[in-house]
Image (cartoon, rainbow, N blue to C red):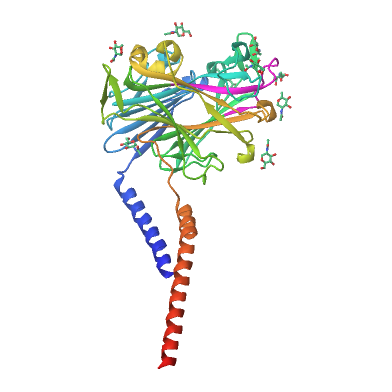
């Protein structure tokens, strides 16, 4: 037993030492967050929310821009350490191209925009949106909500911004209800406090979307919602992104969910029909657990599925990205970059549709670098070791006992005989 205890002790110290090495090896970083940088009263009076988050290390700077002045968008950029964001606010609020730039050209950029929110009538309760007839689909345009900044906060672990979209009005169509968006920029590798407790790196932003008490179309019996994201990455136009479902080892952090969906950008690109692998190219990625919660109290009993559909190409980049941060940043150059769309629908067969709870969530992270992979935690390792180790220890103990007993009895018999 003591040998077994020693091996746990060893494992603990090893992990501890590794932790220290990790802490020591990361150079000091400076993080700054600015809301509406250099805009002042002009932005406050018109309720603009554009957040600039900058992390500078000795080798580079990672910039994030979260914007709600157009379609909700997130842009990330990697530059040399000294670069800063510059916004020409008048042009930016008019949605003009190249009204936002960095003082030094980024070596990599990646971004997303919430392009559309769909409401669909799932007539046959399949949970799938891809075979629904067009007349059973309504499109809600994110820019037709009124986006209000509810709160923001910061601590050593993250910066958090809470936004609410209300008063949907598009032509003659009005809808009551709220779309809540909670954004977190994490400063270190950890699991998020918010279910599904996604693992995130120090380079990630988590976006949590809640469709709360939203008024559905009265002619639809079985409404469900879906979100369409536009994804842009600084890669060759002819390359493609990849969507994968990965099995995870355990569900310790997200009870009941053993899968992770991941969209990654190519490290290899197709150039003139030949695959070129450029190891220097950075990687932007999206990750989410295929789960949607139906209650503010997020747990397995209050959950349903988040179903994704294949990535699709975008025909007219400028038109799709129009009225968003992405168009304001990339401008005409947007046509030369890799751009794709993805749809995620919330709900699954037999869950009682949106009306059962009037609450649907979707949580995903956007990040730079290699997407983090769940590892067995120390607790799980210990449980497994005990589970596997204890029987071995018992078997060995029994073996020794039997052996010793045999020896004893034999020597006893021998002595008797002599
Ligand atoms: C800004 O927000 C406040 C409170 O939410 C609202 O009363 C006001 O009308 C808004 N102003 C504009 C210009 O949208
Ligand atoms: C729903 O089911 C009916 C009968 O099975 C079928 O005729 C119809 O095409 C289905 N509708 C959709 C949208 O799948
Ligand atoms: C409800 O759906 C129908 C059919 O798609 C559409 O004509 C109508 O405008 C929708 N109503 C609302 C309030 O969105
Ligand atoms: C929408 O909200 C307004 C104001 O809160 C209310 O008067 C109206 O009845 C609501 N409409 C529906 C269909 O719930
Ligand atoms: C993309 O592919 C098209 C047609 O195959 C080709 O004409 C074009 O030059 C390619 N673009 C780049 C940037 O490689
Ligand atoms: C959510 O779960 C809690 C406890 O598990 C339960 O009391 C509650 O009714 C559930 N809510 C819904 C909408 O199912
Ligand atoms: C963007 O939308 C505006 C109207 O909001 C329109 O005037 C303009 O032509 C559009 N630009 C592109 C590139 O589609
Ligand atoms: C959801 O909203 C619809 C329409 O307002 C209402 O009929 C239904 O009872 C609500 N469901 C719950 C669980 O509150
Ligand atoms: C995080 O971003 C920095 C660039 O700022 C990069 O050097 C590093 O490898 C990234 N970390 C991970 C875990 O991908």
Residue 146 at x, y = what percent?
57, 19
Q: What residue is shown at x 33% (from left), y 20% (from top)? A: 239
- The residue closer to the viewer here, 109 or 164, is 109
User: Disc count in the image?
Assistant: 0
Q: What residue is shown at x 42% (from left), y 70% (from top)? A: 2
- The residue closer to the viewer here, 162 or 214, is 214
Residue 32 at x, y = what percent?
39, 35
Q: Give the range drawn in magenta.
A: 210-230
Where the C terminus falls, by quadrant? Answer: bottom left
Say left or right for 176 vs 165: right
Residue 243 at x, y = what percent?
43, 27
Residue 164 at x, y = what percent?
57, 26
View extreme (front): residue: 417
Q: Does the magenta stretch include residue 30?
A: no
View extreme (bottom): residue: 418
Query: In terms of image quarters, where does ligand 3 lie?
Result: top right
Where the N terminus falls, by quadrant? Answer: bottom left
Q: Is residue 219 magenta?
A: yes
Residue 151 sits above or below residue 6 on the image: above
Residue 247 sits above or below residue 316 on the image: below
Task: Answer with the quarter of the image where residue 281 lies.
Answer: top left
- The residue closer to the viewer here, 169 or 118, is 118
């Amino acid at each position: 037993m003591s040998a077994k205890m020693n091996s746990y002790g060893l494992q603990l110290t090893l992990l501890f030492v590794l932790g220290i090495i990790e802490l020591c090896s990361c150079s000091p970083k400076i993080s700054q967050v600015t809301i509406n940088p250099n805009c002042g009263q002009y932005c406050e009076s018109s309720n603009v929310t554009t957040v600039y988050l900058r992390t500078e290390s000795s080798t580079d700077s990672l910039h994030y821009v979260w914007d709600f002045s157009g379609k909700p968008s997130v842009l990330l950029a990697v530059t040399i350490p000294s670069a800063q964001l510059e916004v020409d606010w008048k042009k930016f609020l008019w949605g003009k191209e190249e009204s936002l730039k960095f003082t030094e050209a980024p070596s990599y950029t990646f971004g997303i925009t919430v392009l559309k929110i769909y409401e669909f009538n799932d007539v046959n309760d399949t949970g799938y949106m891809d075979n629904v007839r067009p007349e059973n689909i309504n499109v809600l345009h994110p820019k037709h909500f009124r986006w209000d900044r509810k709160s923001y906060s910061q601590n050593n672990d993250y910066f958090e911004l809470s936004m609410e979209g209300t008063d949907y009005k598009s032509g003659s169509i009005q809808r009551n209800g709220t779309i809540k968006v909670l954004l977190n920029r994490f400063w270190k590798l950890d699991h998020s406090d918010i279910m599904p407790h996604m693992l995130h790196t120090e380079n990630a932003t988590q976006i949590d979307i809640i469709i709360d008490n939203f008024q559905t179309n009265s002619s639809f019996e079985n409404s469900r919602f879906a979100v369409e994201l536009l994804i842009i990455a600084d890669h060759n136009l002819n390359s493609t992104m990849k969507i994968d479902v990965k099995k995870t080892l355990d569900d310790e952090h997200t009870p009941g969910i053993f899968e992770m969906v991941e969209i990654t950008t190519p490290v290899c690109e197709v150039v003139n029909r030949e695959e070129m692998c450029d190891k220097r190219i950075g990687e932007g990625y999206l990750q989410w657990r295929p789960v949607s919660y139906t209650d503010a109290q997020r747990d397995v009993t209050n959950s349903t599925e988040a179903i994704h559909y294949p990535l699709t190409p975008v025909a007219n980049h400028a038109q799709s990205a129009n009225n968003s941060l992405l168009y304001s940043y990339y401008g005409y150059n947007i046509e030369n970059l890799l751009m794709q769309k993805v749809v995620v629908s919330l709900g699954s067969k037999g869950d009682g549709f949106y009306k059962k709870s009037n609450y649907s969530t979707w949580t995903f992270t956007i990040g730079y670098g290699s997407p983090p992979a769940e590892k067995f935690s120390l607790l799980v390792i210990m449980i497994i070791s005990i589970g596997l180790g204890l029987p071995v220890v018992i078997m060995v103990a029994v073996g020794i006992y039997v052996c010793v007993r045999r020896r004893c009895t034999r020597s006893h018999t021998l002595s008797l005989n002599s």
